[in-house]
Amino acid sequence: MKPAANDLRSKLAKAKGWGSAKDGVSHWWIQRVTAVALVPLTLWFMYSLFTAMLYSSPSDVAQWFSSPVHSIVMVLMLVAAFWHAKLGLQVVIEDYVHVPCCKYTLLLGNTFLCFVCGALSVLAVLRLHFLDIASGAL
Amino acid sequence: MSSVPRPTSPHLGVYRWQITMITSILHRATGIALYAGAVLLMGWLWSAAYAPEFYAKVHECLTSMFGKLVLVGFTLAFYYHLANGIRHLFWDMGKGFALPCAGRSGVAALLFALFMTLFTWGFALNSVVGG
């Protein structure tokens, strides 16, 4: 039996329901949203890195993050950056790795690594923010 | 089920290098490099907040010639990925697809990266202690 002219998807493809992009628009859209957010956030980060943080002592870095504005912008930058990075590397893995056990391991690893690194870096900024530089206590 | 290696048509070794493919490949490469950089940034922040002895060792590495070279490399990757990313955003809006325009914007992205890196590090080496 010949398939109908407008029925190009195999039955398996229809059953899986993934489509060619596997996930629809959300990945693409959030990648763009984080990208737009990262334009000012990373430029601010570069500015703060080269004027206040690079080659400074930990107490100088804590001094920089004692400002709530600096801290919150840094946290937003870290969240957007790790989210953007996770989405980006996900596409790279999906493009090059096709053996299922390797592919799903790497995809999970990517997701977990981004969450862990995001959490650790945000916690570090918060600690630097709340640190009392003189006494070294929170 | 494992995949059987299938023959692929010739690509990188055969086709003429064009600015569009160079910029696309570089965008992915810099993206991967910046992923590693983000993980390292986390380590640097963590050591500043929780491990001052390790921070001192990291500081030593960063002030070395090799460390500075690595940082310059990350700076270059960052500015390139930023410029080409904005180029992508224009494409997402439907603008700039005509081949001459795409070629010129690609060159612009590369030049932006180069100049901004020189500017940033020129500034850094002039005014930052230890630079």
Image: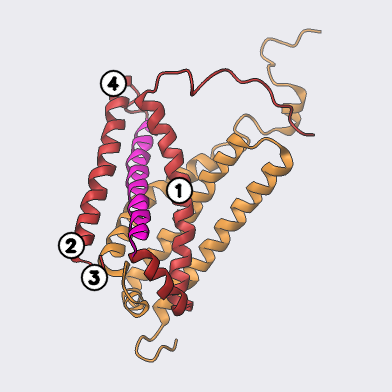
Chain colours: A orange, B red
What residue sits 53% from the left and 62% below the top? A117
Using the rendered view, name the quadrant where residue A8 is placed.
top right
Q: Nearer the viewer, residue A53 or A68?
A: A53
Asked whether disc 3 touches disc 1, contact meaning CB atoms under 8 Å apart, the reply is no
Which residue position holds label 4? B100
Pointer 3 local density, CA inside 10 Å: few below 14, some 14–19, many at least 20: few
**Which residue type does callout 3 highlight?**
Val
Where residue A129 appears, x then y in whole percent?
39, 77
Sequence-first tag of 1 and 2: 1
Where residue B35 appears, x then y in whole percent?
48, 51
Q: Which mark is residue B33?
A: 1
Pointer 1 local density, CA inside 10 Å: few below 14, some 14–19, many at least 20: some
Residue B91 in magenta? yes
Pointer 2 local density, CA inside 10 Å: few below 14, some 14–19, many at least 20: few
> Chain under label 2?
B
> Chain under label 4?
B
Sequence-first tag of 4 and 1: 1
Using the rendered view, name the quadrant where residue A136 is placed.
bottom left
Mark 2: secondary structure? helix
Magenta stretch? B64-93
- In the figure, A126 relative to B106: above or below? below
User: Is the residue at mark 2 from the same chain as the one at mark 3?
Assistant: yes
Sequence-first tag of 3 and 1: 1
Asked whether disc 2 touches disc 4, contact meaning CB atoms under 8 Å apart, the reply is no
Where residue B86 appears, x then y in whole percent?
34, 40
> Chain under label 3?
B
Q: Nearer the viewer, residue B104 or A6?
A: B104
- In the figure, B54 relative to A79: above or below? below
Which residue position holds label 2? B126
What residue sits 64% from the left and 30% below the top? A19
